[in-house]
Amino acid sequence: MVENPVKRYGFIVFLSTIFFHLILMDGGIYDLLTVKLKTRTARLSIMQIEDENAALSRELRRIHEDDQYLEEMVRKKYGLVREGEKVYRVEP
């Protein structure tokens, strides 16, 4: 009994077409993996931004509540000195 070559090759072409659609077409496995990767990247980015936001909120709260810390920050950033203090600059 010999199989009809059209049936055999037609079935192979049919399976290949289904496989191609499942893997590569819009909404296929490739797109699913790409979306999962982008989602994971976005979640990591959100976590980093939330951590940074929390750190900045703590620093802001400390600036509002701790006058010594505020003075230290202003002195470092703007190079301010108190009245009666002397500044010595040492150059290499």
Image (cartoon, rainbow, N blue to C red):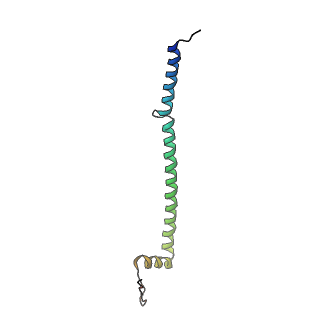
- Where 74 falls versus 47 (above or below)? below
The picture places residue 43, in percent across and down from the top left corner, at 51, 51
Q: Residue at x 40, y 77 (%)?
A: 78
Residue situated furthest front in the rendering: 2
Residue situated furthest bottom in the rendering: 84
The picture places residue 36, in percent across and down from the top left corner, at 52, 43
Q: Residue at x 51, y 35 (%)?
A: 29
Task: Decide which of 36, 89 is in the foreground and name it.
Answer: 89
The N terminus lies in quadrant:
top right
The C terminus lies in quadrant:
bottom left
- Where 61 falls versus 3 (above or below)? below
Residue situated furthest top in the rendering: 1
The picture places residue 26, in percent across and down from the top left corner, at 45, 34
Count of numbered marks: 0
Task: Decide which of 30, 4 is in the foreground and name it.
Answer: 4
Task: Decide which of 36, 18 is in the foreground and name it.
Answer: 18
Please identify the quarter of the rendering in which residue 74 is found: bottom left
Q: Residue at x 50, y 33 (%)?
A: 23
Q: Residue at x 51, y 76 (%)?
A: 66
- Where 11 falls versus 45 (above or below)? above
The picture places residue 72, in percent across and down from the top left corner, at 47, 78
